[in-house]
Image (cartoon, rainbow, N blue to C red):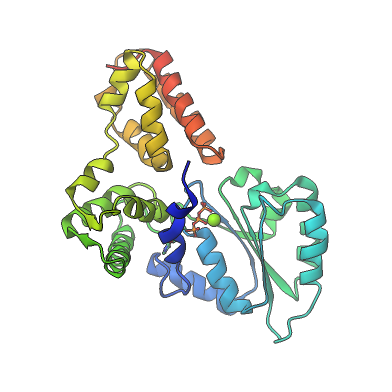
Amino acid sequence: MLEMKDWVWAERYRPKTLDEYICSLEFKEKIKNWISKNNSHLLFESSCPGSGKTSLAKIIADKVAGNEVLFLNSSMDTGIDTIREKVANFVSKKSMFGNMRVVIMDEADQISDKASDSLKSLIERFHSNARFIFTCNNILKISDPLKDRCEVVNFNSIHGEPGSISRKEAAVATLKLCERILTENEIKYDRIVLIQLVKRFLSDTFNLRSLIQFLYQNTRDSVLDEGALKKAVFELTEIFKHIKEKRFAPVREFIAIRYQYWQQIYTEIYNNVDVYFNIKSTKITALFEVLAFHQHMTVTSPNKEIPLCSLFSAISGLDIIK
Ligand SMILES: Nc1ncnc2c1ncn2[C@@H]1O[C@H](COP(=O)(O)OP(=O)(O)OP(=O)(O)O)[C@@H](O)[C@H]1O
Ligand SMILES: [Mg+2]
């Protein structure tokens, strides 16, 4: 599993202001509008982790409420008692500065049903005092009454669709951020390699955290060179060869090292079905069901290694590997 120190750069370089926040210009205008009008509760959702939901919630809260912000991680503060005590207590008080107070409920898909019910009434009762920002990875777990009270924003698309101009703009801004991180940490880097890495990590989904973590883990010798590119390749020929020959130990080893880049693994398989599999097999359609099912499980599973092992084992059972 990922060690705490591996989060270091991602945390240290978390954007603190809207200027530092990477997104399309169009979306930035929308954010400014929320901040100035400040009349809606927000629900940030994305199946893609590390796409900037919590960071943006904090930036908006800071602008709107300064230090009158209550931040709750719903996976830890999930129960009805927390809602009753902490949230009710916080939202029932007027701001000392005539602002709105803001409650951030991070990872709101972990809120219990009872707590969700009680939040629903608090949102309405204290609308003149407080705004709520929820973030989640699985919108299906958010109750309808809560959803209905919020403006829902899907983060899978705020950085532009893959291949679009705004995605290219996001990639350029990301490149700049990576260069800053590497320079500040006195890492010598090959710019071409860095560009390739940015492309590889941001071409499909937008998981900036996994790119920053990758840089952190692969620059321990204070250099970023071609060797890193090889590690960012999620080419699976070898892995599928092991699976076909029923050798699961190297597959588990691969998963243990790469599990945090699980999105790239799914993308690699989906984009290269004809490379890895016998597409004339009648079982090929079952592959997509296996992919969809396991991808969903991986999003929500606290330990990504388990659904990934299950994915490769299910593919093995289909008997379609070339
Ligand atoms: N839009 C962005 N601009 C700048 N940095 C970003 C952006 N999105 C993510 N990051 C980087 O990735 C890290 C993780 O971002 P954040 O915690 O906001 O993602 P998240 O969507 O809340 O993830 P999760 O779904 O896992 O909760 C940040 O600390 C920051 O370093
Ligand atoms: Mg988050």
x and y percent of residue 42 in the render? 61, 63
x and y percent of residue 53 in the render? 52, 59
x and y percent of residue 218 in the render? 30, 50
Horizontal side of residue 196 vs 153, given as left or right: left
Q: Looking at the rendering, which quadrant does residue 101 occupy?
A: bottom right
Is 211 situated above or below 87?
above
Is 75 situated above or below 53?
above
Question: Does the rendering let one see residue 73?
Answer: yes
Q: Residue furthest front?
A: 221
> Residue at the location (25% across, 62% down)?
187
Question: Does the rendering let one see residue 118?
Answer: no
Q: What is the tally of numbered marks visible in this picture?
A: 0
> Residue at the location (75% across, 76% down)?
129
> Residue at the location (20% across, 60% down)?
189
Q: Looking at the rendering, which quadrant does residue 271 occupy?
A: top left
Is 76 situated above or below 317?
below
x and y percent of residue 12 in the render? 44, 65
> Residue at the location (28% across, 67% down)?
176
Q: Looking at the rendering, which quadrant does residue 68 occupy?
A: bottom right
